[in-house]
Amino acid sequence: MIGGMAISLRNKLAASAAVIAVVGVVAWRTTRPKPIAVVLGDVDRGRVERTVANTRAGTVNACRRAKLAPQAGGKIAALPVSEGERVREGQLLLELWSGDVAAEVSVAEERERGAVLRRDEACLRADVAERDAARAARLHHDGLVPLDSLDHASSSAKALRAACNAAGREILQSRAALEAARAGMTRTVVRAPFSGVVAKVTGELGELATPSPPGIPTPPAIDLIDDSCLYVTAPIDEVDVARVRLGQIAWITLEAMPDKRIEGRVRRIAPYVLDLEKQARTVDVDVELTRPEDAKALLVGYSADVEIILEAREGVVRIPAPAVLEGGRVYVYDAKRGTLDERRIETGISNWGFSEVRSGVEQGDKVVLSVERAGVKAGARVVPETPKSK
């Protein structure tokens, strides 16, 4: 009987222990922190670039852009183009009223014609006088004409030949005056110096257009852009620009097209430093488009960023740059335990996208990209975040 009571007691104790264990497990599971959802990235192999980028937004510019205005002032008589219109080289863009200048041209043309007629008359008289002088010389040789008559005929011929030559010089003067008058006509018209698109028209028919006085800039009458050739000007920090060289490859990105990357090449490095902001001095670097056809997708004035490639390595172990913490630390995901391990890595070259890894992690590891989330630390329980469907 005593043995039976002992067995019963042991069974009760075992049952109580089991209940306590179950309660403890339930309590532990209900009270411990929930796993943190984290974004993971892969450690893989690929290309890594060391780059420098602009400190402020760059700008898409045209290789040729002309802000045109008539050389003279006057009332706008013709304005055959409008904003956004494409024009060809030499096409008339604007014309001022030029009735007075046209009259001056007509007067100059008539003066030239009159000078030609006077020259022809003077030269004809000189020819006649020279023939008379020659005849007088023969007669004087035969003793039929006295010497004073010969001298008079010769002097008259020379005087008339000089008048002929002088009339010829008057023609040159008249033609110079005509060219000056015609040049005045060109000062009243604006023609396209190259083919392009009209970006801005300032003025209307009948309005007065005046050239800019010295030191007082005025808006141009026509702003013409050659959008077949574009480039990006980007301000690079004075510390970084020392490593930039002409011909280096660069990647252009635009706020208007965030998913598009355009290849370019450094074509100019400004030989001076801009100190618009005393604490952020920069040097302007121009990047031309490698493929001219890419210019068709761009508009002059777009804001743009450039990444200039200083060095590139292929097929190296790399890690997404957002995963790297200060001091060369990363959080590696342990899939078996569902926790994070902190590791120190040795990095090589890097940019905004990837960093080369020389040691610390291996290809195939998963690292945390969302390092800024609360609770992300070594030993934390995490679950990979499911990407949102687009």
Image (cartoon, rainbow, N blue to C red):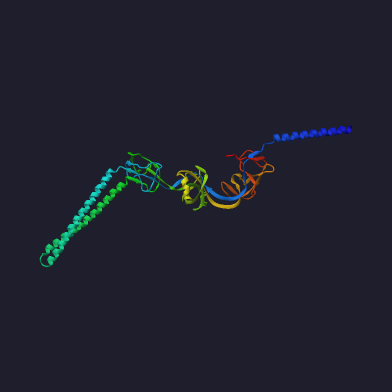
Q: Is residue 104 visible?
A: yes
**Which residue is painted at 16% across and 62% down in the image?**
131
Residue that protrudes farthest toward the right in the picture? 1
Q: What quarter of the picture does the N terminus occupy?
A: top right
- Residue 283 lies, in percent from the top left, at 48, 48
Q: Position of residue 367 (x, y in %)?
A: 63, 45
**Residue 388 x, y percent position in the rendering:** 59, 39
Left or right of residue 354, residue 57 in this image: left
Residue drawn where x is 21% and y is 56% of the image = 166
The C terminus appears in which quarter of the rendering? Answer: top right
Residue 11, horizontal then vertical, whole percent: 83, 34
In which quadrant of the rendered view does residue 383 lie? top right
Residue appearing at x 79%, y 34% in the figure: 17
Q: Residue furthest front?
A: 390
Q: Is residue 71 visible?
A: no
* In the image, residue 173 above or below residue 96: below
